[in-house]
Image: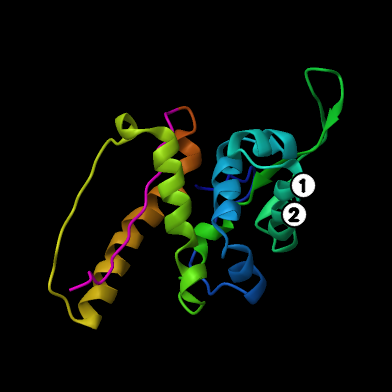
Amino acid sequence: MGEPEQSGTARRPRTRRPATVQEAKALAHPLRVRILRLCLTRELTNKELADRLEVTPGTVLYHVRQLVDAGLLLPAPVRTGASGALEKPYRATGETWWLDGPLLDTDAGSAVAPVEAFQQELSEAGPESVRTYSRFVLHLSDEEVAELDRRIVAVLDEYVATDGQRADRPVYAGAFLLHRPAD
């Protein structure tokens, strides 16, 4: 999820920031979240995305445009495909990681878009893809929830910020989610 290292310039530590309205709107659909995740590790064309996500190219194009307009997806250089046709791939910017709770102030349906996307990815990958799992129940005040989140996100931020240094290793995806269970 990290961003590529900049050559010849010193990288400043990244910090989280609030999402713009346009970014929050772009992240409010599970298909757009999946497009971003797929385009994070490699550049993909509209057709490749449509095939992978099992939706029409027109549907993908609509969602790709929303992500490009929000600055979360960028067109990559045009390339020649296997059949000799020119292809226009896209790549994720990695900016979504640095957005602080982009969907917390949205409607309930939008707020669960990343969870729905994760469920779809996990289902597609199959149960054998799970490498680690922790399930827990804790009694916490609102302040303790905020502290737990801050500490976990700080550890993840360290890994995200240096991910480019590990690009030769296998890719893993995950999610940290804290919720109030139904009684």
At 20% from the left edge and 76% from the top edge, which residue is drawn?
144
Is residue 107 shown above or below 2?
A: below
| In magenta segment, residue 163 | no
Q: x, y percentage for residue 37? A: 54, 46
Contact? badges 2 and 1 (CB < 8 Å): yes
Question: Is the residue marked by circle 2 packed among few (<14), some (14-19), or many (20+) residues within 10 Å?
Answer: few
Q: Which mark is residue 62?
A: 2
Q: Is 170 included in the stretch rendered in magenta?
A: yes
The residue segment tinted magenta is: 169-183
Q: Secondary structure at mark 2?
A: helix
Identity of the amino acid at label 2? Answer: Tyr
Is disc 1 placed on a helix, strand or loop? Answer: helix
Q: Which residue is mark 1?
A: 58
Q: Is residue 166 left or right of residue 47?
A: left
x then y, percent, for residue 118: 43, 49
In the rendered image, is residue 94 in sight?
no
Q: Position of residue 162 (x, y in %)?
A: 45, 45
Nearest to the observer: residue 63 or residue 41? 63
Whether residue 23 is visible here, answered yes or no, is: yes
The answer to which quarter of the image holds residue 32 is bottom right
Task: Using residue 129 as the reference point, say whether residue 75 is left or right of it.
Answer: right
Kind of residue sitting beneath label 1: Gly
Instruction: Give the number of the disc on residue 40.
Output: none
Which residue is found at the position 74% from the left and 42% from the top?
57
